[in-house]
Image: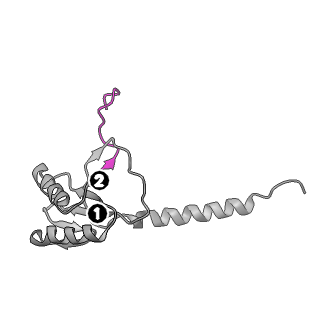
Amino acid sequence: MSEINVTPFVDVMLVLLVVFMVAAPLLTVGVPVELPKTAASALPADTEEPLTVTVGVDGSLLIQTTEVAEEEFLTRLRGISEAREDKRVYLRADGAIPYTRVMEVMGALNGAGFTDIGLVTDVGGPSFGADGG
């Protein structure tokens, strides 16, 4: 027999496809936030779980999925910053939040020692390209 049987390979690929389709929605942080849409591309994946700070529509602050009072927010961030090697943090803010509030949180993140702050948005928004969209 001089042919390669690809049926087992296809079966394995289909199983992996189903596994990733089921697992992908579970990897996002489960805090409902209406992110603004931009034309920016997604950031590359890391080996360490990224730290995510969320500013809710009511102005509440969450580190990962834990709500934190504003008075202890900076203290918690400093403790996390000392414990982590990676100084990257992702900031998720509802699109209805005033720009001032987002900048206050970014200043707190920087003051806590995080030097690489990524703003999380949804894809598919307006772009400033030549296509006018």
Residue contact at pointers 1 and 2, CB within 8 angstroms: yes
**Residue 128 image offset from top left, x and y in percent:** 29, 32
| Residue 115 in view here | yes
Q: Is residue 97 above or below residue 112?
A: above
What residue do we see at 47% from left, 66% from top?
A: 23
Which is nearer the eye, 100 or 74? Answer: 74
Tell whether position 39 is magenta.
no
The chief SS type of the magenta part is loop
Q: Distance of mark 1 from mark 2, alpha carbons?
A: 9 Å
| Residue 86 sits in quarter | bottom left
Q: Identify the image quadrant of residue 52.
A: bottom left
Q: Is residue 132 magenta?
A: yes
Residue 32 placement (x, y as % from top left): 26, 63
Q: Which residue range is magenta in the image?
A: 118-133
Q: Residue at x 10, y 51 (%)?
A: 100
Q: Which image quarter is the N terminus in?
A: bottom right
Residue position for label 2: 120
Horizontal and vertical percent position of residue 113: 22, 61
**Residue identifier under label 1:** 52
Return the x and y of residue 49 as percentages of the image width and height.
Answer: 38, 66
Name which residue type carries label 2.
Val
